Image (cartoon, grey):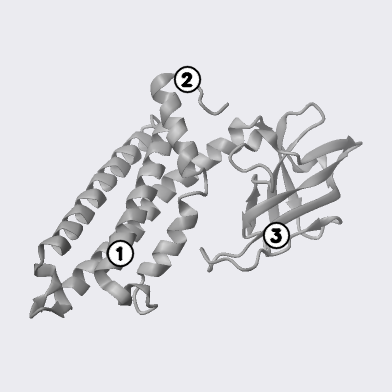
């Protein structure tokens, strides 16, 4: 099992500011720093850690469990993505063979290219959550009787359901088109950002509307909606926050950098 170490306690949206670094020591390097919010960290056999070399260039290095000075404390008390083991990567003068450096991974563009694939997956995963929320709300609305008839027969409930299925369909089409472009090696990172942001926003809104249709039952573990709502609160900020993806799209269409 492996994990991917980019985010740091003080640098999430701005990975270029990372403080993790290494110095050369003959045939080895000495790695120091810390990474945070790392999935699989508590049990990963290896960690792909991104750090700055003596010249300040971002490099990828494989850190192996059992190396002296390398520890992975688990993050406790999460209310979202609770099925995922999350932790830190603490690197205290870890001595690592230079052969563990990725030879062609130089510069921040390399780890960011990995994130593009993750963001594409999230675009589909978030819509999967939205589909489950919609399906649950639709079935419940057909079965739940109030004022002598199923609540699915009331105009306001139908409005919610109609908007849900419309938004899901639009997001599915955007993601599908993006998949076609990726298969042709034509998809851009900016297009992926748009799809990730759209899917997360759409899914979050649909989950909230579905919870309202179920009323008090919407917060019950008997139904999946509250679980999706809590998980989507993480998804909307991980692999790039909602605001960062908005600015990526803004820079793409204007040519102007609003990040700084």
State left or right for residue 134 relative to residue 64.
left
Q: Earlier in the sequence, mark 3 or mark 1?
A: 3
The answer for how far apart the CA atoms under marks 3 and 1 are is 36 Å
In the rendered view of the protein, which quadrant contains the C terminus?
top right
The answer for how far apart the CA atoms under marks 1 and 2 are is 38 Å
The residue lying toward the viewer, choosing from 244 and 53, is: 244
Q: Earlier in the sequence, mark 1 or mark 2?
A: 1
Q: Which residue is mark 2?
A: 256
- Name the residue: 35% across, 68% down: 225
Query: Crowdedness of circle 2 by 10 Å Cα count: few (<14), some, many (20+)?
Result: few
Q: Which residue is mark 3?
A: 45
- Name the residue: 65% across, 44% down: 6
Residue 25 percent coordinates (x, y): 91, 38
Local secondary structure at mark 2: loop
- Name the residue: 37% across, 51% down: 124
Residue 68 percent coordinates (x, y): 86, 56
Q: Closer to us: mark 2 or mark 3?
A: 2
Q: Which residue is mark 1?
A: 133
Local secondary structure at mark 1: helix
Q: Earlier in the sequence, mark 2 or mark 3?
A: 3
């Amino acid at each position: 099992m492996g994990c991917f170490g980019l985010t740091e306690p003080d640098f999430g949206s701005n990975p270029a500011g990372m403080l993790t670094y290494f110095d050369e020591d003959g045939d080895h390097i000495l790695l120091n720093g810390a990474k945070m919010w790392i999935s699989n960290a508590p049990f990963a056999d290896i960690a792909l850690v991104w750090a700055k070399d003596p010249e300040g260039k971002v490099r990828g290095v494989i850190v192996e469990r059992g190396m002296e000075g390398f520890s992975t404390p688990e993050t406790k008390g999460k209310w979202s993505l609770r099925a995922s083991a999350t932790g830190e990567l603490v690197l205290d003068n870890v001595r690592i063979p230079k052969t563990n450096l990725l030879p062609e991974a130089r510069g921040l563009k390399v780890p960011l290219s990995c994130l593009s694939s993750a963001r594409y997956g999230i675009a589909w995963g978030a819509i999967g959550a939205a589909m489950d929320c919609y399906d649950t709300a639709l079935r419940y609305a057909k079965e739940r009787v109030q004022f002598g008839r199923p609540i699915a027969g009331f105009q306001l409930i139908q409005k919610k359901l109609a908007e849900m299925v419309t938004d899901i369909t639009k997001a599915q089409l955007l993601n599908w088109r993006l998949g076609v472009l990726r298969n042709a090696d034509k998809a851009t990172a900016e297009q992926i950002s748009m799809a990730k942001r759209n899917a997360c926003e759409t899914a979050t809104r649909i989950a909230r509307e579905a919870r309202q249709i179920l009323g008090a039952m919407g917060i019950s573990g008997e139904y999946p909606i509250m679980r999706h709502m809590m998980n989507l609160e993480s998804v909307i900020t991980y692999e790039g926050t909602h605001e960062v993806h908005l600015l990526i799209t803004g820079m793409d269409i204007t040519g102007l950098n609003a990040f700084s």
